Image: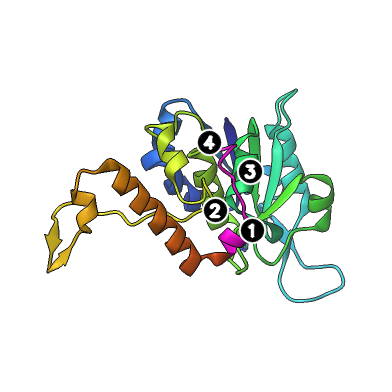
Amino acid sequence: MRIDVITIFPPLLAGAFEHSIIKRARDGGIVDIQIHDLREYTDDRHRTVDDSPYGGGAGMVMKPEPWFRAVESLRPQGNPGHVVLLTPQGRRLEQRLVQEMAAEERLIILCGRYEGVDERIREHLVDDEVSIGDYILSGGEPAAAVLVDAVVRLQPGALGSSHSVVEESFSDGLLEYPQYTRPPEFRGWRVPEILLSGDHGAVERWRREQQIERTRTRRPDLLLTGDDVSETTS
Ligand code: ADE
């Protein structure tokens, strides 16, 4: 998979893609991630990317020309990519939408600044708008880091084994069960005896019960929607 990210702050994102699972996926050729500086696509001495809004008002609006120039110059013949603008006005990011994005051959991600982008970018350049939640960030960069991380870990081979994806929270619509490791007792708090019993069937049943109970108390909305996004995971 190929992912291009266009931003006015490349260093904000570079570090996010140089560690852990994303680094391994890049090194292993599973994903090719390129970060591009929007200012490289300006044509004036000051490398201007924004201007004051028509009609007045506070804040600045990102100009259309650099965005169109950037996206058009990144597109090789034949593979236009799916162009995604990160914005609080977008579709809310959930695992199902991550799966949809992960199935694309190429994503071109635009990090807008919060005050806004010229509407013609939305109308004529962007295929999709995504929000990572109902809160306001200063710009799309942290949202791009979230989207890329969630998408890359779904690429075949990105994780040690596909098993871990299948067992994760949300892959079956439930939260995860509690996990413990050594020591069996820490400051007087003991690991549940059943996990030390060696009875695999009992452990599995206990874990399932814990998942259901945890989901019921913390995220009852997940049980109500009956969402099962597991079929398309792994
Ligand atoms: N830009 C600013 N806030 C955002 C959010 N919540 N999601 C995606 N992009 C954003």
Near mark 3 (Cα within 10 A), the count class, few <14, some 14-19 or many ≥20, is few
The answer to which of marks 3 and 4 sits earlier in the sequence is: 4
The answer to which of marks 4 and 1 sits earlier in the sequence is: 4
Magenta stretch, residue numbers: 221-234
Horizontally, residue 81 falls left or right of residue 35, namely right
Near mark 2 (Cα within 10 A), the count class, few <14, some 14-19 or many ≥20, is some
Q: Residue type at mark 3: give it.
A: Glu
Q: Residue type at mark 2: give it.
A: Phe
How far is disc 3 from disc 2 in space, using C-alphas?
Answer: 12 Å
Which dot marks residue 40? Answer: 3
Q: Main secondary structure of the magenta part?
A: loop
Please say if the residues under marks 3 and 2 sit with CB atoms less than 8 Å apart: no
Please name the residue that numbered disc 1 is placed on. 225
Please name the residue that numbered disc 4 is placed on. 33
- Using the image as rendered, state which of residue 188 and residue 98 is in the foreground: 188
Horizontally, residue 199 falls left or right of residue 8, namely left
